[in-house]
Amino acid sequence: MDREELELLAKESVDCVFRVHRALGPGLLESAYQACLTHELEKRGHQVESEVLLPIHYDGLKIEKAYRVDMLINNALLIENKVTQELLPVHKSQVSTYLKLSELRLGLLINWNTRLIKNGISRVVNNL
């Protein structure tokens, strides 16, 4: 997927996040937001994988269940959902690690527990 297509996918995904948050507001469980966001993205024709296992390799050893990515959209965009008081640097580091291990370029970190969802969305870029 080229950069322009990836940016369009990210924009559409953010639009879906806004739609879900506008309908539900803050205060639900992460799993509820993830299910609703999956529904919105699939309605727009996107392929959504949830709870994707991300292995790591070390010294000839493959650890299959090392990480679990919340959402993978069209095999190109990673989305990590949180419901927390505030996003911390460790949350961005988590997404950055996922991007490096998966060799993807862009991830969205979403904190659903905000009054204004625009304040809960962070882009994380992997400059391969």
Image (cartoon, rainbow, N blue to C red):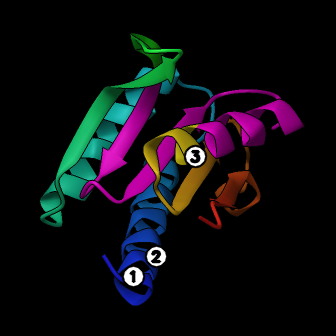
Give the side of residue 74 with respect to residue 100, left or right: left
Which residue is the site of mark 2? 11
Please, what secondary structure does the residue beneath circle 2 have?
helix
Whether tag 1 and tag 2 are in contact, CB under 8 A, the answer is yes
What is the total number of numbered labels drawn onto the structure image?
3
Which residue is the site of mark 3? 100
Q: Gap in Å between the C-alphas at discs 3 and 1?
A: 21 Å
Quadrant housing the N terminus: bottom left
Residue 111 in sight from this viewpoint: no
Residue 99, image x, y percentages: 55, 47
Give the side of residue 107 with respect to residue 3, left or right: right
Quadrant housing the C terminus: bottom right
The residue at the point 68 percent across, 33 percent down is 94
Front one among 55 and 34: 55
The residue at the point 82 percent across, 31 percent down is 90
The residue at the point 36 percent across, 73 percent down is 9
The residue under label 2 is which amino acid type?
A: Lys
Which residue is the site of mark 1? 8
Residue 95, image x, y percentages: 63, 41
